[in-house]
Amino acid sequence: MMLGMLVGCAQPAKVPENPAPLVWPPAPAAARLVHVGTFSRPDDLGIRKGALQRLADILFGGSEARLVRPMAVAVVGTTLYVADPGAKGVHRLDPATGAYALVAREHGAPLPSPVALARGEGGDIYVSDSALGKVLLIRAGAKHAVPVALGAPLRQPTGIAYDPVTRRLAVVDTAAHRVLYFDAQGALSAAVGRRGTGAGEFNYPTHLWRAADGRYYVTDSLNFRVQILDDQGTVIGQFGRAGDASGDLARQKGVATDRFGHVYVVDALFGALQIFDASGRFLLSVGEIGSGRGEFWLPTGLFIADDDTIYVADSYNRRVQMLRYVGGAQ
C-alpha cells in the first residue's frame, strides 16, 4: 500500500513545447546540420527506474544517475556508452530496453580517468583510462571493465580505435607523443611518432578516429593540426593551423568522419564543432560557447553513429548533444 501511495502521488513531468528547429547554417542558406536532442540523465532517454527502485531511493536516500563530466561517447546498436571521469566510470544506457548501469572495475574499484571509447567486436567497448595507464574492455552486457593485456607499457593512453578487418587496436599515448598498434593477441606491431613538428611527429596528441576507409585521424594537440595516417601508420596528410579564425584550431579534441567524407573536429576553446572536407578545406562551424541548445562549454569527445547521428560530449555542460548532417554529399 505504501508503494502504491508513493508512486501514485508522484506528479507527471511537464513536457515542454517543441522548440523551433535549430539548424546550421541559419536560413536562408540551405541547412547542413540539425540539432536532434540532448541528454544528461537516463530519464532524458526514456530510461526510468522501476517502482521498487524508486521506493528504495525514497526510503534509503538513493542518488539520481546523471552525467558529471562526459569525455567520450560510443554507440553500439541501441546502446550508448559515455566515458565520465566525474562519475568514475562509463555510463551504459539503452533506451530500447530501459537498462542503465555505471560500469567500473571489478570489486567496486572506480575508473579514475576514462577518457576515450572505441567499438570492438560483437558489442564490445574499449575504454582508455589515462590515470591507470591502461586500456580496458567492457563486454556486451558485462557488469565490469577488465584490463586488456598489451605488449607494451602505456604512459598516458588517450585516444583509441579498433580495426575490425585486421583486429588491431590503435592507442594514442599522449605523454609519449606517439600512436601504438597492437595485434589481436595484444602484441605491439607498430609504434608511430616522437615529439616534434614534422610529418609523423606529434606534440601531445590526444584523440583518434578510424574512418571506414581505414584512415586514422589523430588530433595533434599542440601542433594545432590533425594528422592522417594510413592503416600502416604512414602519414598521408594533415590539416590545421593555430589561430582564432574559422577553420583554425586552438584546442582541438574529438575528431570523426561521416559517410560523405567530411571530417568533424571539436574545439574546446572555441566551444564549436568545425567541419572540413576530405582535403582539410574548412566548410562550416557549428556552435559557440554557452549552455543553450547547440552551444558548448569545453566539449571533448565526438562520435558519429551508423545512423549518421553526431554525438558531442559537452563536458562542462554535463551533457551529450546530438546532431545530424542533412546536407547530402556536398
Image (cartoon, grey):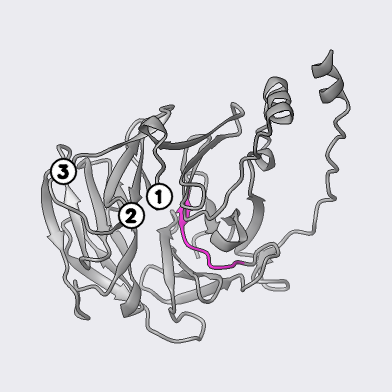
Relative to residue 160, is residue 238 depicted above or below? Answer: below
Nearer the observer, 324 or 311: 311
**Three-letter amino acid code at the position of disc 3:** Asp
Which residue is the site of mark 1?
A: 112
**Three-letter amino acid code at the position of disc 1:** Pro
SS of the residue under disc 3? loop
**Camera-nearest label, 1 or 3:** 1
Quadrant in the rendering for residue 109? top left
Which residue is the site of mark 3?
A: 183
| First in sequence: mark 2 vs mark 1 | 1
Residue 310 horizontal/vertical position (percent) = 53, 54
| First in sequence: mark 3 vs mark 2 | 2
Which residue is the site of mark 2?
A: 131
Q: How many neighbours does mark 2 have within 10 angstroms: few (below 14), some (14-19), or many (20 or more)?
A: some
Number of the label disc, if any, that sits on residue 122: none
Tell me the CA gap for discs 3 and 2. 23 Å
**Three-letter amino acid code at the position of disc 2:** Ala
SS of the residue under disc 1? loop
- Give the extent of the magenta segment: 296-304
Res 261 seen here = no
Res 274 seen here = yes
Residue 287 horizontal/vertical position (percent) = 61, 70
Quadrant in the rendering for residue 127? top left
Tell me the CA gap for discs 2 and 1. 6 Å
Residue 206 horizontal/vertical position (percent) = 34, 64
Quarter of the figure with the N terminus: top right
Nearer the observer, 321 or 154: 154
Residue contact between numbered discs 2 and 1, judged by CB atoms under 8 Å: yes
Q: How many neighbours does mark 3 have within 10 angstroms: few (below 14), some (14-19), or many (20 or more)?
A: some
Relative to residue 239, is residue 3 depicted above or below? Answer: above
Tell me the CA gap for discs 1 and 3. 26 Å
User: Residue at the location (17% across, 68% down)?
Assistant: 193
